[in-house]
Every structure is written in C-alpha cells, then in structure tokens.
Image (cartoon, rainbow, N blue to C red):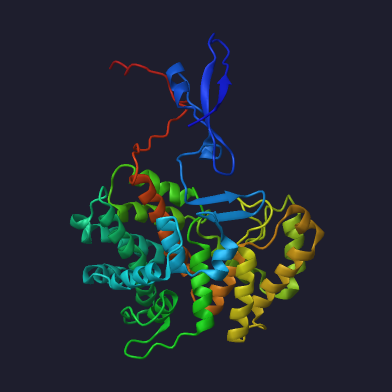
Amino acid sequence: MTDKKAHLTIDGINTTIELPIYSSTIGPDVIDVTSITKNGFFTFDPGFMSTASCESGITFIDGEEGVLLHRGYPIEQLAVSSDYLETCYLLLNGELPTPAQKEEFTAAIKQHSAVDPSIANIIKSFKRESHPMAILCSAVAALAAVYNDEIDITNEASRKLTAYRLIGQMPTLSAMVYKHRQGEEFIAPDDSLSYAENYLNMTFGTAGKAPNVSKTIAKAMDRIFVLHADHEQNASTSTVRLSGSSGTNPFAAIAAGISTLWGPAHGGANEAVLEMLEEIGSVENIEACVARAKDKTSGFRLMGFGHRVYKNFDPRAKVMKQTCDEVLAELGLENDPLLAIAKRLEQIALEDPYFISKKLYPNVDFYSGIIMKAIGIPTEMFTVIFALGRAVGWYSHWDEMVSSPYKIGRPRQQYTGSPKRDYPQK
C-alpha cells in the first residue's frame, strides 16, 4: 500500500508519469518504477546501488549510523546474548525460539549433519592443492543431486527439511575440505558437541580420539558464525535470489552464492588482512606502510579498515575485538610477531586523526582474520568459514522469496552496440 506518489517528467513526453512510493518500516522508502517501461524507458543503475531488488523482512542495514538488525534485533545484542543456531532460527522463522523450540531445532540440525558417502568421494576426488572454495562449491552443488527427488520448493515442510540439511552439513563439508587438503582422515559429526565445537573437532581433531575443544575457541568460532550470518542484499545473497527465482534446486542456488562469495571483492577481505600483515613483515615497517596508505597517489590501502556499507563504524567489529582479545589470551599469542603488527595498526586506526576523520575504523574482517589465524585456520580457508556462517542467510532469503509469489529475475540493459545491419553479400 502507498499513500505517496512521485511524478516523473521527461523531455519530449507531454504526460507526467506517476510512480507509487512504498514506505519501509525503517530506512529509505522506495519508488516503484516498473511503469516507465510502458513509455519506452529503463532505469540505469550500474551495480544496483540505488535499486531495491526485492521486499524483505530479514535484515536491515543503516551504513551511515552503523546499524545492523536481524529481524529487528541489533547484531551487537545477538552476538553477546544469542548463539549461532538461535540466530539461524531467528533468521528462518522471524522470531527467537522458546527453549523448547531451540532444543527441537538444535536436535534437528544435529540429526542432519552427516554427509552422504557420495559427497565424501567427490571431495576426495579433488587434488589436495585445489582451492577450498572450489571444493566446497562443488560439494554443495552435489547436494542438489543427493536430495533432488526429495525437494519440493512449494512445500513448507520440504523447505524446512532442506534448511536443516544445509545448516547441519555445512560444518561437516567445510571440515572435510580442510581434512582433504591436509591429507587427513575425515571425522564424523559428534552429537554431544555444540555446533561450533563440532566444527572445530571435525577440523582439528584426530580420528579415533576423544574431542578436546577449548570453550573459549568454540565461543569465538560461534561468534564468527553469528556475525557473518546475513548482511542483506549483498552480491552473493542477490545471486542466490536471482538463481533461485528460476525455480532451481535450492542447493544449486546456494552453490551459486558460494561462487560469488569466492570473489576477492566480496568474501576475501579477511584473507586480504592476513596477506597485508605478512607483507608488512614487522612492527618497524608500519609507519612507512601507514604513510603509503595516507598518500592518495600510492594506490595502496590498508585492508580491514573502513567498510563499503558502513560509513561510520562496523557494528560487528566491537564484539569481534573483544573476542579477539580473549582468543589471543587463551592461546598465549599476545606477543606473536604477526599479531603484534595487527595490534599496532589497530591502535593507529583508533588514535590517528587521519583515520578518525576518514572513519577508517577496524572492521569485522580485521578481527576475524586475526582470530582465525590464531586458531590455526589457513588463510585460504577463511572464505569457507564465511560461507559456513552465511549459508543460513542465503537460505533465509531464498525461502522468503519462494514462500510468496515471485517473478524470475530479468535485469535490463542500455544497449550501446551496433544498430541493425545486413550481412554483407559475397
């Protein structure tokens, strides 16, 4: 419903085009421009930076104010008071679970955490040095084959079961990717462990030995999952929606999202942070590095500072900083050379007038990269962790879309090629 309208006048057209304006709960209202095609026009918005591609009630971001809400709940509160599976339930269902609902949901996720043997064989078929995101993408796409005959996207119960399978198996698949690249035996899921504990045990544990997972490390891992669970209509989420709008298998749509996340401009930020720290080499080189970052002509920029969306501060970063400090203390790594560089850069960013004026504060990728490095996760696996946490966000958006009437996505273009011409006579 709308009680506001915009009026568009175009040179050469005598009539004014009336455009409905729809009100958002919070954030900018949207102008419905679909009617302008009747007058022979498309809107032009490269990157869709000013276009609302859908209506959604899942996540809201206000980049200017540093706000991130999941179903209305601030991410800072969820990261401290909730856990990943509770956040998953919230994203999927719109409300926090009761204790009984949380127990039932957790049990369902654990029930569906084992991976079909055919998927394990697919992972083993890759060369060990293959990029982990390529392996993960292929494994998730293969789930579409495993469950193809069991999925009915028009059926709510079928969609719920698919969500359980995706959330339950992402840690297993991610750990299997790591183990394969290490040349180690896969470890089966353990129902006695929490979600994060289970992932860490399957990743770093030894087959045949009892789990031995630090509670501090497990808490940090769970918080990383929570802070990456969803981020509105980013490139990978939009990919999942666009792919899913064709009615394709949801695992295929999620695999498309993983492919998009793989790109360094999207999911590789925390990996880039570690590469930058390694390039700096030592604390003694920081001042020169910072000077380069301030020089607009150098083309160099510090990774992990500032954010494309958040123009003030990243609301996830404060919680991640606290977790980072806890992990470093737990592991006794406060004096690690690489982490010493990170801590000094953090101090400069928080105190230097240049960084403050530009609002280049450390973001969530800065701290999560440090944490994962400290835990022992290889940098090439960072984006796999991102995908693990983000899977529920992708699925929630896909489920929201297919639960209501929807159209197949069909972006338009401004054609600038050759006009019609005849094939030359020979």
Of 407 and 22, the residue lying toward us: 22
Task: Give above or below for 273 relative to 374.
Answer: above
Image coordinates for residue 149, horizontal then vertical, percent: 18, 55
Q: Which x, y percent locates residue 180? A: 34, 75
Residue located at (37% from left, 72% from top): 103
Q: Residue at x 33, y 16 (%)?
A: 422
Position above or below: 208 against 35: below
Query: Where residue 202 sits: x, y (%)?
Result: 38, 79
Quarter occupied by the C terminus: top left
Query: Looking at the image, which residue is at 38% across and 67% down?
Result: 101
Kindly tell me whether residue 397 is visible in this rendering. Answer: yes
426 shown above or below 263: above
Query: Could you tell me how many numbered marks the image carries?
Result: 0
Residue 376 in sight in this render: no
In terms of image quadrants, where is residue 126? bottom left
Q: Can you tell which quarter of the image residue 138 is in?
A: bottom left
Q: Is residue 269 left or right of residue 169?
A: right
Residue plotted at (40% across, 57% down)? 92
**Quadrant of the rendered structure where residue 178 is?**
bottom left
Above or below: residue 329 compared with residue 73: below
Q: Is residue 65 left or right of residue 287?
A: left
**What is the x, y in percent for residue 107?**
33, 73
Q: Residue reaching furthest bottom?
A: 209
